[in-house]
């Protein structure tokens, strides 16, 4: 028993000791995951943590701004309610200029949030002003024109004629009636009153936020740099995923919220450095943790490597001997008894593996021998086609069938096609090419071959299966060739015997058909000599009808290619026509509804005679008045059985009377037993007879 093993260290120059190699691998196995983890966490920090911190900070600012936003709107709404109270007061509606001046001063003292109170006539002339001036006009102002149209106005920051400071104007129409506006009262608001609200949202420190309020023209109303006009390009765009350059030249993140009542913008900015401060601290802690972990892992790896130095050295010596093919020398290794149990188990495993391989080789040789014997006994050979080399590898039995020397294991395609006989060669080649081109699994074909040398022609069955790649290309074709010459010859002899049997059956059927025709003719001649009213006439007529039912079946068989099967529907239709001629009367109508149902002679003749008895009996006894309908139905049931139903609308019969004991009734029951059938009879009205049987 020999075992060939390949071990590179056994054939090469001495390598570094196993301790150094394994320790280095242990260090790498311990440190590399830490490094990969550090890189992954660093990437996660840049990709996920920084955006998460930024989103958290900006969402916190947005929540905080909601309070400032509400305070600003509430402050403006409060001043609007005050001015609406002034416009709706009785003193205002009286519209006396002298009284209005007094009322304006009193209102200003009562509501200090208003910068002034001004009453304007419909023509735009100021008639009362808490500043003490009147007569100047505001007719060209948009807020005055909107108020005269009945609107409640809150303007953006504007510059009034009487003051150099920018103000916000709120205006209300003075209504003398439901449809009459007698003037306008307005009040300027100082935006500086909002500064305290906005400044509460501003923090100090390295990453301090700043919040300022912009009007519709991007002018800073309050907050840092109040009165400054900010270019739109230096304001947050609403995209918080990336920083932008603020209007003071700093890299910022920002949140913009619109004060819907005023169409102003509340802008809050935070320095970009504050956003990355937390992730930077996280990365520093990460680097420290990974460094400490790497040092600990290296120390543990060194300790583990030193603890397994002796077992690894023994394993190295064992591997060298096994690699040199000297695995039996393990028994002579020094300190064998002191070797770890793992090494002793490894030696036993190698020995068992060598023995197993030898046994498997011996079994494989036996299997190949049995396969060859089996193929030779079954006259079955196998082959494999290589489309790239255009060669065919054949088994020994395939070579024998082809008449080729057994040492020729690989053949050219032309050599294999050369043994196919005559016209079968192009057909085989065409079908092979078509199956490859069409992507089918393969094909099979029976044809003649003429083996090379002096072999006689053989008839074979070939089948091939194509093996394709993932792209559908042909990799190889596996096939088998089976010598079926004896089976082919036997099939031809069976075909000849079948033709002879068919001819004999046709002759028998022809003679039976002729004999039944002679019997019918004799019965018909004898019947015609008798009087129609005598019992003998009726007996002969019934016999004639029964013979006719059998003769019609043989007529059906004679007209068909199948000498054993007949369509029961055609047979019943022809039989009804005969009964109509023999027993029919002008007042009796026959109806049929027939499904196609195929039966053989053993079922067809009893069925025909049963139908004959039932229909003849109905024709003779059901209609004493001379008129009525006889219906015949043939159905194919879901169970596979057939159902034959004969009904008439005649006089019926007495259900309590004794059962009929005549020849016809007894014959019907015997015939039903022959076809393993069942019969059911019901009356009122008429008679319904149901017969079920299997075809």
Image (spheres, rainbow, N blue to C red):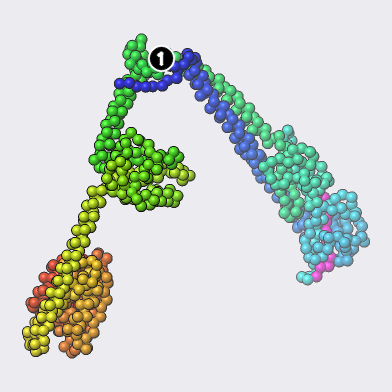
**In what element is the residue under mark 1?**
helix
Q: Is residue 475 visible?
A: no
The image shows a total of numbered marks equal to: 1
Q: Residue at x 65, y 33 (%)?
A: 278
Prevailing SS of the magenta stretch: strand
- Residue 387 in percent (x, y) is at 43, 41
**Horizontal side of residue 335 vs 585, given as left or right:** right
Q: Nearer the viewer, residue 42 or 229?
A: 42
Is residue 583 visible in the rendered image? The answer is yes
Please determine whether, in this image, residue 202 is positioned above or below residue 97: above
**Which residue corresponds to the image point at 31% horizontal and 50% vertical from the top-left?**
446
Q: Which residue is mark 1?
A: 317
Q: Residue 335 versus residue 133: which sits nearer the camera?
A: 335
Q: Is 310 situated left or right of 167 in this image? A: left
**Image quarter in which the N terminus is found:** top left
Which quadrant of the figure has residue 95?
bottom right
Query: Is residue 510 part of the magenta span, yes or no?
Result: no
* Left or right, residue 183 beside residue 583: right
Relative image position of residue 296 (x, y in whole percent): 53, 20
Is residue 190 a member of the stretch shown in magenta?
yes
**Residue located at (66% from left, 45% from top):** 63
**Most foreground residue, 408 or 56:** 408
Q: Please identify the quadrant where the C terminus is shown.
A: bottom left
Magenta highlight range: 180-192
Q: Measured along the vertical axis of the image, is residue 254 above or below residue 650?
A: above
Q: Is residue 278 above or below residue 670?
A: above
């Amino acid at each position: 028993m020999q075992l060939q093993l390949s071990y590179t260290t056994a054939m090469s120059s001495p390598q570094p000791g196993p301790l150094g190699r394994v320790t280095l691998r242990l260090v790498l196995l311990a440190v590399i995951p830490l490094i990969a983890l550090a890189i992954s966490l660093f990437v996660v920090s840049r990709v996920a943590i920084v955006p998460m911190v930024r989103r958290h900070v900006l969402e916190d600012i947005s929540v905080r701004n909601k309070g400032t936003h509400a305070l600003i709107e509430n402050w403006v709404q409060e001043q609007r309610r005050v001015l609406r109270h002034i416009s709706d007061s009785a003193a205002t509606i009286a519209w006396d200029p002298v009284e209005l001046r007094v009322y304006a001063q009193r209102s200003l003292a009562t509501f200090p949030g208003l910068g002034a109170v001004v009453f304007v006539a419909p023509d735009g002339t100021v008639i009362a002003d808490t500043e003490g001036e009147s007569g100047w006009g505001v007719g060209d102002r948009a807020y005055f024109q909107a108020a005269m149209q009945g609107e409640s106005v809150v303007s953006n920051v504007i510059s009034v004629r009487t003051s150099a400071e920018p103000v916000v104007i709120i205006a209300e129409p003075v209504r003398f009636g439901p449809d009459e506006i007698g003037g306008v009262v307005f009040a300027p608001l100082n935006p500086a009153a909002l500064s305290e609200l906005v400044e509460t949202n501003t923090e100090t420190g390295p990453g301090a936020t700043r919040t300022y309020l912009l009007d519709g023209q991007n002018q800073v109303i309050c907050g840092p740099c109040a009165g400054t006009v900010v270019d739109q390009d230096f304001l947050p765009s609403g995209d918080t995923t990336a920083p932008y350059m603020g209007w003071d030249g700093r890299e910022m993140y920002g949140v913009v919220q619109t004060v819907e009542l005023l169409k102003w913008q509340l802008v809050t900015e935070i320095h970009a450095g504050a956003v990355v401060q937390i992730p930077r601290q996280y990365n520093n802690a990460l680097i420290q943790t990974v460094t400490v972990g790497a040092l600990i892992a290296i120390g543990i790896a060194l300790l583990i490597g030193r603890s397994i130095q002796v077992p690894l050295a023994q394993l190295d010596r064992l591997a060298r001997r096994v690699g040199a093919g000297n695995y039996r020398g393990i028994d002579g290794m020094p300190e064998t008894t002191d070797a770890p149990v793992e090494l002793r188990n490894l030696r036993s495993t190698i020995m068992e593996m060598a023995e197993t391989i030898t046994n498997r080789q011996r079994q494989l040789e036996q299997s190949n021998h049995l396969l060859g014997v089996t193929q030779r006994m079954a006259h079955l050979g196998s082959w494999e086609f290589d489309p790239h080399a255009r060669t065919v590898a054949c088994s020994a039995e395939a070579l024998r069938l082809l008449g080729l020397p057994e040492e020729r294991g690989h053949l050219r395609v032309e050599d294999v096609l050369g043994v196919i006989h005559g016209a079968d060669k192009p057909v085989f080649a065409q079908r092979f090419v078509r199956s490859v081109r069409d992507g089918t699994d393969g094909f099979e074909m029976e044809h003649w071959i003429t083996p090379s040398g002096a072999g006689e022609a053989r008839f074979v069955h070939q089948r091939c299966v194509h093996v394709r790649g993932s792209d559908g290309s042909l990799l190889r074709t596996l096939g088998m060739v089976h010598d079926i010459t004896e089976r082919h010859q036997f099939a031809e002899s069976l075909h000849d015997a079948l033709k002879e049997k068919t001819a004999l059956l046709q002759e028998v059927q022809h003679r039976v058909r002729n004999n039944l025709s002679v019997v019918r003719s004799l019965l018909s001649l004898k019947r015609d000599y008798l009087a129609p009213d005598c019992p003998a006439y009726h007996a002969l007529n019934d016999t004639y009808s029964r013979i006719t039912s059998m003769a019609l079946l043989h007529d059906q068989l004679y007209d068909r290619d199948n000498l054993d099967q007949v369509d029961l529907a055609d047979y019943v239709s022809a039989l009804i026509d005969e009964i109509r001629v023999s027993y029919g009367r002008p007042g009796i109508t026959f109806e049929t509804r027939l499904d196609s149902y195929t039966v053989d002679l053993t079922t067809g003749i009893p069925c025909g005679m049963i139908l004959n008895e039932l229909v003849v009996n109905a024709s003779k006894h059901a209609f004493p008045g001379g008129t009525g309908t006889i219906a015949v139905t043939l159905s194919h049931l879901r169970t596979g059985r057939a159902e034959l139903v004969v009904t008439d609308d005649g006089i019926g019969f007495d259900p309590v009377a004794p059962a009929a004991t005549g020849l016809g009734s007894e014959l019907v029951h015997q015939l039903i037993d022959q076809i393993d059938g069942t019969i059911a009879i019901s009356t009122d009205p008429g008679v319904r007879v149901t017969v079920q049987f299997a075809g």
